[in-house]
């Protein structure tokens, strides 16, 4: 009986600590869950661009022609500034499917760089440090691709997507 009481007492002492450990998530603003939620918000905000005519009617235009492993960059110039707005990417990327029909594949954020010799740090983008901002020296801007429609084996924030191909 004494052993049963001791075991019960140990369980009663240990159980709250186990429940506390299980219930506590070492959650910080930098956890992958946060940026994944932001990606979901971006997907919802840009779903309408599955129809390229919606983008064109809003003022987006093909600013690049086809770029291998990226697609066509449809730019909305009025969005280009020094601010990252999650639900308002400056560029919508489209790539032709096997029938030549333009398919929404990704978005891109761009932020101008005033001085390429001193570009500073990348813009605040998605929560955490998983996004991969790059400097495009030809356009003097920070750029961030987000492959929200066409899966990218190199990662959702990689600049190039080998599944988009070379346009042929």
Image (cartoon, rainbow, N blue to C red):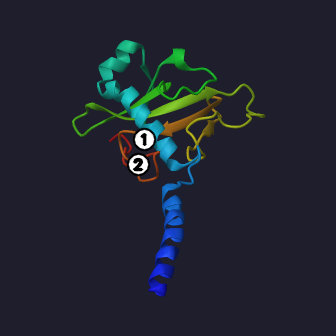
**Mark toward the start of the polypeptide (1 vs 2):** 1
Most foreground residue, 143 or 63: 143
Q: Can you name the residue that lies furthest to the front here?
A: 1
Residue drawn at (56%, 43%) of the image: 131
Q: Can you name the residue that lies furthest to the right here?
A: 118
Marks 1/2: CA–CA distance: 6 Å
Where residue 144 appears, x then y in whole percent? 54, 37
Q: Which residue is mark 1?
A: 147
Most foreground residue, 36 or 152: 36
Residue drawn at (48%, 47%) of the image: 33
Q: Secondary structure at mark 1?
A: loop
Q: Which residue is mark 2?
A: 152
Image label count: 2
The N terminus, quarter of image: bottom left
Where residue 7 appears, x then y in whole percent? 48, 80
Q: Is residue 32 visible?
A: yes
The C terminus, quarter of image: top left
Residue drawn at (42%, 19%) of the image: 61
- Do tag 1 and tag 2 residues touch (Cβ < 8 Å)? yes
Q: Is residue 66 visible?
A: no
**Whether residue 100 is situated above or below residue 61 in the rendered picture:** below
């Amino acid at each position: 009986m004494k052993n049963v009481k001791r075991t019960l007492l140990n369980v009663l002492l240990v159980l709250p600590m186990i429940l506390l450990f299980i219930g506590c998530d070492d959650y910080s603003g930098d956890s992958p869950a946060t940026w994944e939620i932001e990606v979901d918000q971006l997907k919802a905000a840009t779903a309408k661009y599955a129809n390229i005519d919606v983008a064109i009617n809003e003022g987006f235009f093909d600013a690049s022609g086809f770029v291998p492993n990226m697609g066509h960059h449809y730019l909305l110039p009025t969005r280009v500034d020094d601010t990252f707005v999650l639900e308002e990417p400056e560029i919508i990327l489209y790539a032709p499917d096997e029938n030549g029909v333009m398919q929404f594949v990704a978005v891109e954020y761009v932020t101008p760089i005033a001085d390429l010799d001193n570009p500073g740090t990348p813009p605040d983008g998605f929560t955490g440090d998983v996004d991969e901002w790059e400097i495009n020296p030809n356009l003097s801007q920070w750029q961030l691709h987000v492959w929200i429609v066409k899966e990218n084996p190199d990662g959702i924030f990689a600049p190039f997507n080998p599944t988009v191909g070379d346009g042929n």
